[in-house]
Structures are given as structure tokens and as C-alpha cells.
Amino acid sequence: QVQLVESGGGLVQTGGSLRLSCAASGSTFSIFSINAMAWYRQAPGKQRELVAGITKGGTPNYADSVKGRFTISRDNGKNTVYLQMNNLSPEDTGTYYCAASPKRTWLAESYDYWGQGTQVTVSS
């Protein structure tokens, strides 16, 4: 089993920045088995959507809506993935979830492990 704990959410004004962190813990075998890690978000009344993901080798993937504004990175030594969010807009408001998968995938159903979520609120 893998546990994911997110941190870094909060309230920010339009144009501001936040950095989310997600730390993974668990057995050595479970941690080693993780390939893709990703950030998803869900706004009230909307479906969960992929924001950004990154493979174990460091290949990133971004939703079109965040390209050029968000940067995902990963420190395999610390079992941590980060999401640097710049130039935030109210449309970025939502609960952000960290997820991990043993597969190299961006499909939510392929992610076995999920964090509890951290709230990001962008005021206009």
C-alpha cells in the first residue's frame, strides 16, 4: 500500500502562485512500483480532470488549460511530486488530488492510490 499526503493548498488572488507537494510513503516495494504520479482537480459540480502528470523517468504531461502556467516535477529520492502553479485564475479553483500508478498512464481509472486532496481557491 502507498499513502499520499498533499500539502500547499490555500487561498490566493488572481495572478498569484501556489506550490503543491505530495509525499508518498509505504513499503519499499510499493514505492518502487510507482511509475506515474499525477495531479487531478475537481471543482464543484464538475468532473475530476487531469491537471498534470509525470512518469518515473520525468516525462511530463499537462492539460491544455494549464500549459505554460503550471510545472510538475518529481524527486524520486524523496518520493515527492510537486506542482508549481503560476498565474492562477478563478477557473483553477478546486480540490487538487495527488495520485500514483504502477503504470505509465494518464487515465484516472489506472491510478491505484489517491491522496485526501488539498483545496485551492483563487479569488477574482
Image: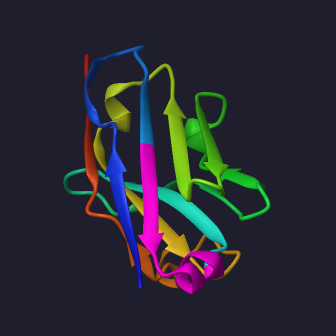
In the picture, which quadrant includes the N terminus?
bottom left
Q: How many marks?
A: 0
Range covered by the magenta-colored residues: 21-33
Is 20 left, or right, of 34 in this rendering?
Answer: left
Tell me if residue 8 comes above or below residue 75 in the rendering.
above
Is 67 left, or right, of 43 in this rendering?
Answer: right
Tell me if residue 123 comes above or below residue 111 in the rendering.
above
Q: Residue at x 56, y 59 (%)?
A: 79
Q: Indicate the quadrant where residue 31 lies.
A: bottom right
Extreme residue in the front direction: 28
| Observer-nearest of 59 and 46 | 59
Tell me if residue 87 comes above or below residue 8 in the rendering.
above
Q: Residue at x 49, y 74 (%)?
A: 108
Q: Indicate the quadrant where residue 57 lies.
A: bottom right
- How is the model colour-coded? rainbow
Q: Position of residue 16 (x, y in %)?
A: 40, 15
| Observer-nearest of 104 and 21 | 21
| Observer-nearest of 87 and 37 | 37
Q: Residue at x 43, y 53 (%)?
A: 22
Q: Indicate the quadrant where residue 4 lies.
A: bottom left
In the picture, which quadrant includes the C terminus?
top left
Tell me if residue 24 comes above or below residue 89 in the rendering.
below
| Observer-nearest of 67 and 6 | 6
Residue 15 among those drawn in magenta: no
Q: Position of residue 84 (x, y in %)?
A: 53, 33
Is 12 left, or right, of 89 in this rendering?
Answer: left
